[in-house]
């Protein structure tokens, strides 16, 4: 009967020792042994790339969404938008965009 009660305790102790031995093994490894992320990983991510456009380019559809429109253009030291156009902010750049998405002016702003 004593062995039936001791078996769960032994299994628990064996599990804890195995886990701690595995932890100690990975803790002692040098950082050089870990595979390094490729240097181009950040460059290939679409969220990390900064795209800039010039006058006459067509702003991609995803940047014509309402969240990019700048209503308070004075706050950014931008000139008043001409009738039928609006300012769009993408990153640190500002674009005066026509309804068809063609960039009319690139603004410096502040």
Image (cartoon, helix red, strand yellow):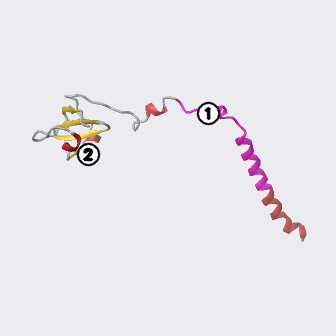
The residue pinned by badge 2 equals 65
Query: Mark 1–mark 2 contact, CB under 8 Å?
Result: no
Quadrant for the N terminus in the image: bottom right
Residue located at (24% from left, 36% from top): 109
Quadrant for the C terminus in the image: top left
**As drawn, which residue projects farthest toward the right?**
2
Residue located at (71% from left, 37% from top): 29
Which one is nearer the viewer's eye here, 31 or 98?
31
Indicate which disc residue 48 carries.
none
Q: Secondary structure at mark 1?
A: loop
x and y percent of residue 76 in the render? 23, 41
Q: Identify whether 83 is placed above or below 58.
A: below
Which one is nearer the viewer's eye here, 15 or 70?
70
Q: Where does the magenta region start and end?
A: 14-38
Q: Main secondary structure of the magenta part?
A: helix
Q: Identify whether 65 is placed above or below 110.
A: below
Binning the other alpha carbons within 10 Å of mark 2 as few (below 14), some (14 to 19) or many (20 upward) gives few
Binning the other alpha carbons within 10 Å of mark 1 as few (below 14), some (14 to 19) or many (20 upward) gives few
Indicate which disc residue 35 carries.
1
Residue located at (73% from left, 39% from top): 28
Q: Quadrant of residue 80?
A: top left
């Amino acid at each position: 009967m004593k062995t039936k009660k001791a078996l769960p305790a032994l299994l628990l102790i064996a599990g804890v020792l195995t886990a701690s031995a595995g932890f100690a093994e990975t803790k002692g490894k040098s950082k050089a042994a870990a595979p390094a992320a490729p240097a181009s990983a950040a460059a290939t991510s679409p969220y990390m790339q900064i795209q800039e456009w010039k006058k006459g380019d067509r702003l991609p559809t995803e940047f014509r969404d309402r969240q990019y429109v700048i209503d308070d253009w004075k706050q950014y030291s931008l000139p008043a938008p001409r009738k039928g156009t609006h300012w769009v902010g993408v990153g640190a750049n500002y674009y005066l965009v026509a309804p068809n998405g063609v960039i009319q002016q690139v603004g410096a702003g502040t």
